[in-house]
Amino acid sequence: MNRQEQISSSNNRDGMLFYIWFDWQSAEIKFNLISDYDTALPFGCEIEITNRLESIIEDFLRFPYHDGFPFEEVRNDDEQMEEVVEGETLRVFLLKINR
């Protein structure tokens, strides 16, 4: 079933939120569709909403590790990695779809 069919056949009287982000851990562009009943997106980090889908695609294209992370760059220093991840803001393209 495609997304348009999901929206049309939904019993939800509210609109939907369609959002896209670049997941650097998997090196993939991901998307989801949820009810706009609760407008909080399900991320456990700081997010930056953008109205430019191109910025998500640009993040994906500029990512240097599409074939995986080089072994030399993998460190056992978990604290250092946690500090880097905590400081990152996830850019998310958000589009409200009205019913």
Image: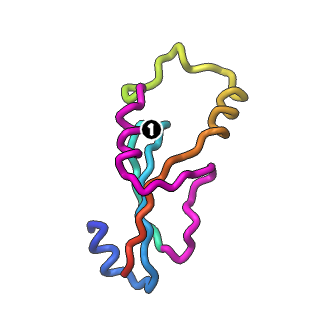
Please say whether residue 54 is one of the residues in the magenta stretch: yes
Q: Residue furthest top?
A: 72
Quadrant of image for the N terminus: bottom left
Residue at position x 38%, y 29% in the image: 66
Query: Quick one: label 1, few (<14), some, or many (20+) residues within 10 Å?
Result: few
50, 74: nearer the viewer: 50
In this view, 97 is above or below 72: below
Quadrant of image for the C terminus: bottom left
Residue at position x 65%, y 29% in the image: 81
Residue at position x 58%, y 54% in the image: 43
Amino acid identity at mark 1: Ser
In this view, 56 is above or below 94: above
Residue 9 at x, y percent in the picture: 32, 81
Using the rendered view, name the quadrant where residue 33 is placed. Answer: bottom left
Residue 74 at x, y percent in the picture: 56, 20
What colour-coding does the image apply?
rainbow
Q: Residue furthest right?
A: 79
- In this image, 79 relative to 22: left or right? right
Please say whether residue 59 is one of the residues in the magenta stretch: yes
Residue at position x 69%, y 22% in the image: 77
- In this image, 84 relative to 62: left or right? right
Judging from the image, what secondary structure is the residue with disc 1 in?
loop
Q: How many labels, in total?
A: 1
Residue 62 at x, y percent in the picture: 39, 31
In this view, 94 is above or below 79: below
Task: Identify the residue position indicated by label 1 in the image.
Answer: 26
Give the magenta range. Answer: 36-64
